[in-house]
Image (cartoon, rainbow, N blue to C red):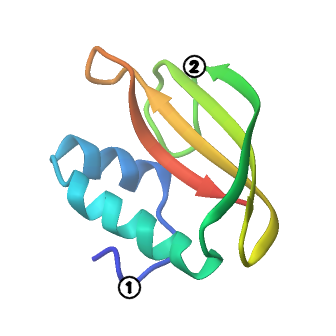
Amino acid sequence: MLARSNKLTLSAHLALMRTGHEDEFLSWMRARRAPLGKPKNRAFFRVTYSHTLLGAPDGNYELVIFKTSFEHKAKAAEEVTLTTETGRWQVSGYQMR
């Protein structure tokens, strides 16, 4: 399922995490980042709190953004989405720009 697409929506991330397929999520992340090479530098950029996210139910979300450089991509922004959907903060999404 994950190997066929380089894009995964937030709702798909949430669904994967709810069903306990964390190994598939991690495999997808590794495959997506592999062509970029190893990270050379990663620096915290900002965190934003939101009660709403496109394609996801209303809830508590934090979007944590890092400015990252990789061996084969000099400038990238990694966005990690955190949610309290299960009653504790956990990673529910990842996107690179």
Q: Position of residue 5 (x, y in %)?
A: 45, 79
* Lateral position of residue 91 relative to residue 24, left or right: right
When the figure is inspected, residue 18 is found, relative to residue 11, above or below; the finding is above
SS label for mark 1: loop
Numbered marks: total: 2
Position of the C terminus by quadrant: bottom right
Out of 35 and 50, give the one closest to the viewer: 35
Callout 2: 10 Å neighbours few (<14), some, many (20+)? few
Q: Residue at x 71, y 42 (%)?
A: 66
The answer to whether 49 appears left or right of 31 in the picture is right
**Residue shown at the point (70%, 25%) measured from the top left:** 47
Q: Quadrant of residue 62?
A: top right
- Amino acid type indicated by mark 2: His
Of the numbered discs 1 and 2, the one sitting upstream in the chain is 1
Q: Amino acid at mark 1?
A: Arg
Residue 83's quadrant in the figure?
A: top left
Marks 1/2 in contact by CB < 8 Å: the verdict is no
Of the numbered discs in the image, which one, if any, rests on residue 34?
Answer: none
Question: What residue sits 35% from the left and 44% below the top?
Answer: 14
x and y percent of residue 23 in the render? Answer: 22, 58
Residue at (58, 82) in percent of width and height: 35
Q: Judge by depth and name the residue closer to the eye, 40 or 7.
A: 40
SS for callout 2: loop
- Residue, disc 2: 51
Q: Residue furthest top?
A: 87
Q: CA distance from mark 1 to mark 2?
A: 31 Å
Residue 64, placed above or below residue 54: above
Q: Pick out the residue farthest to the left.
A: 20
Few, some or many residues within 10 Å of mark 1 (<14, 14–19, 20+): few
Looking at the rendered image, the quarter that the N terminus falls into is bottom left
Foreground label between 1 and 2: 1
Residue at the spot of label 1: 4
